[in-house]
Amino acid sequence: MTIEPETADFIIIGGGIAGASAGYELRDMGKIIILEKESQPGYHTTGRSAAIFQKGYNGGDPVLHAIIKASEDFLHNPPNDFVAHPLLSPRDLFYITTKENAGALGKLQDNLSEINVGITLLDHKETRRALPHIADDYQDSALMEEDVADIDVSALHEGYLRAIKSRGGQIISNAEVKSLCRQKGQWRVTSAQGEFCAPIIINAAGAWVDQIAEMAHISPIHIQPLRRTMALIDIPVDMQPAKNDWPIVMDAAEKFYFKPDSGKILVTPADQKLTVPCDAQPEEIDIAHAAHCLEKATNSTVNKIDHSWAGLRNHVADGHPVVGFDPEKPGFFWLAGQGGFGIKTAPAMGRITAALIMGRSLPQDILDLGLREKQICVGRLK
Ligand SMILES: Cc1cc2nc3c(=O)[nH]c(=O)nc-3n(C[C@H](O)[C@H](O)[C@H](O)COP(=O)(O)OP(=O)(O)OC[C@H]3O[C@@H](n4cnc5c(N)ncnc54)[C@H](O)[C@@H]3O)c2cc1C
C-alpha cells in the first residue's frame, strides 16, 4: 500500500525565526507545514543571539536599516493576542573607541546621521558620567544611539509559532528534510517524519540553505556560516556595584560588545570564523578573547566565565538578505542570509515573503523606506 504524502499550500523548511515569521504572515493564505530537523525550532542561530534591537546596524547599512525600521512597529506594538508582555525593553547603547581609533567613531557618526538614526555625541565629561565603568582609554568620547532595546526573542518566536498553529498550521520537529523533487506542479518533500507535498516551498534553513537547494538541483547562493562566540561572565569584583540598567557598550568598529544579562555580563569578541553548517560550539581561544575584551574596556579582572556558546551568522557576499523565488525552478522560495540581524528584521522579512509569494510588490511602507526588490532578490547572486 502506498501512503499518500500530506499536502499543504506552503512547506517551510526550517523553524527558526525566519521560517516562523514567514509562516505567521502566510497563515491566512493557505495551509502551512513547517519542517524542522531539530527537536526544538529555536535550537540553532535563533536561540543563540544577543537579542539586540538597534537601527544603526552594521555601521549604518541603508538596506538593513530600511528592513529594521519596517519591523519596528510590530516589535513595539504586536497584536493584542500575540504576547502577554512587551517584546522590547529599552536599553541605552553607547559606541566607544580609544583615542587612536577616534576615526571609527567619527565615521560611524556620519553614517548613522546619513540614514537618520537618532544619535548623540558625548564629550569626555559626558562619557565619564554615562559610562563610569569604562576604562579611561575609552572615555575620550562616545556615541549614543537612541531607541535601542533588548528583544524577547523566545516570546517573538513562540508568538509566531502559536499563531500559525491556531490557524491549523503544523510545526513538525525532528523532521529533517532529506530530498526534494518537483512533479506535476508540486514539490514532494521527503523528511525524517514522512512525505509532504506543496506547490511552494520556502527555504528558511539558515546555515543549511545551500544544501536544501542542492537537493532541489538548484544552484547555491554561497551562504557563509560565520561562527560568533558569546560568553556570560560573572560581574568582576572591580566593576561592582553592578547595575541592571547598564547600557550595551559596543566598540565603534564592532570588535566587541557587551551588555548586562541576567545579573551577569554578556560579551562577544565579535569573532566571525567561516565554518561549515553545524551545531556551532565555542572555542577556548574565542572565550578567552571575550574575557580579554571586557577586561581591557573596563579595566577589570574576569574571575569566572559562567557559560558560553556560539552561533552561526549566515551571510551572502553583500551582507544583505536573500528573499524571493528562485529563477531556476518554480515554487522554490529563498528566505536566507539574515546574518546578525535576523531577529530585529523578522517582522518585515515575514511581510516581504508573504507579499512576494502572493505575487505582489514589496509592501508600500517598505518601498517608502527605500528598499527595492533587486537589493534582496536571488538573481543578484546567480
Ligand atoms: C552570536 C549571535 C548574536 C546575534 N545577535 C543578534 C541580535 O542581537 N539581533 C538580531 O536581530 N539578530 C542577531 N543574530 C542573528 C539572528 O540570530 C539570526 O539572523 C536568526 O536567528 C536567523 O534565523 P534563521 O531562522 O534564518 O536560522 P536558524 O535559527 O538557524 O533556523 C534555521 C533552521 O533550519 C533548520 N534546518 C536546517 N536544515 C534543515 C533540514 N534539512 N530540514 C529541516 N530543517 C532544517 C535548522 O535546524 C534550524 O532550526 C545573532 C546571531 C548570532 C549567532
Image (cartoon, rainbow, N blue to C red):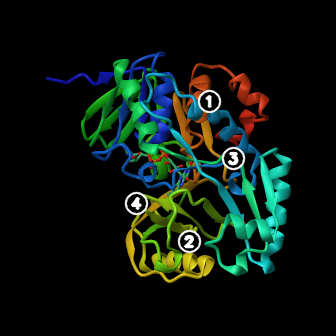
Mark before the other along the chain sequence, 4 or 1: 4
Mark before the other along the chain sequence, 2 or 3: 3
- The amino acid marked with disc number 2 is Pro
Quadrant where the image shows the N terminus = top left
Residue under pointer 4: 278
Mark before the other along the chain sequence, 2 or 4: 2
What residue is drawn where x is 39% and y is 31%? 161
Find residue 202 and report its horizontal and vertical position in percent: 48, 33
Find residue 330 and report its horizontal and vertical position in percent: 54, 28
What residue is drawn where x is 34% and y is 19%? 168
From what the image shows, is residue 59 above or below residue 332?
Answer: below
Viewer-nearest of labels 4 and 1? 1
Q: Does residue 141 show up?
A: no
Residue under pointer 3: 55
Q: Which mark is residue 352?
A: 1
What residue is drawn where x is 81% and y is 45%? 115
**Is the residue marked by circle 1 packed among few (<14), some (14-19), or many (20+) residues within 10 Å?**
many
- The amino acid marked with disc number 4 is Cys
Mark before the other along the chain sequence, 3 or 4: 3
